[in-house]
Image: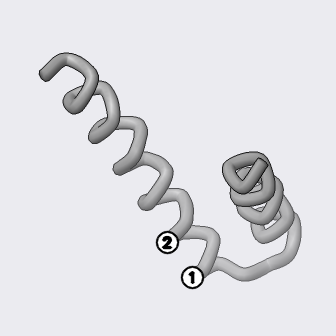
């Protein structure tokens, strides 16, 4: 549930013009997408 709220917040921030926050969130999500598979393979 918390993850869904996080994703919703990111999408909401994309709609609002919050460039710096959105960019940080995108980098964070991108980092998670790269980092999590590495954990699963190990």
Tell me what residue is drawn at x 44 percent, y 60 percent: 28
The mark tally for this picture is: 2
For disc 1, the marked residue is 20
Horizontal and vertical percent for residue 32?
39, 46
Q: Residues within 10 Å of mark 1 (few under 14, many from 20)?
A: few
How far apart marks 1 and 2 lie (CA) works out to: 6 Å
Q: Is residue 32 left or right of residue 23?
A: left
Look at the numbered discs 1 and 2 and tell me whether their residues touch, using CB distance below 8 Å.
yes
SS for dot 1: helix
Nearer-the-camera pick, 4 or 1: 1
Q: Residue 6's x, y, as percent?
A: 70, 59
Q: Is residue 26 above or below residue 16?
A: above
Residue carrying label 2? 24
**Residue in view at x 86 percent, y 75 percent:** 16
In this image, 42 relative to 22: left or right? left
Element carrying mark 2: helix
Q: Position of residue 30 (x, y in %)?
A: 43, 47
Q: Is residue 13 above or below residue 28?
A: below
| Residue shown at 68% from the left, 49% from the top | 3
Against 6, residue 39 (above or below) is above
Split into 4 quadrants, where in the image is the C terminus?
top left
């Amino acid at each position: 549930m918390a993850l869904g709220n996080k994703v919703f917040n990111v999408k909401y921030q994309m709609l609002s013009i919050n460039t710096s926050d959105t960019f940080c969130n995108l980098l964070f999500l991108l980092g998670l997408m790269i980092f999590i598979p590495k954990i699963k393979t190990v």
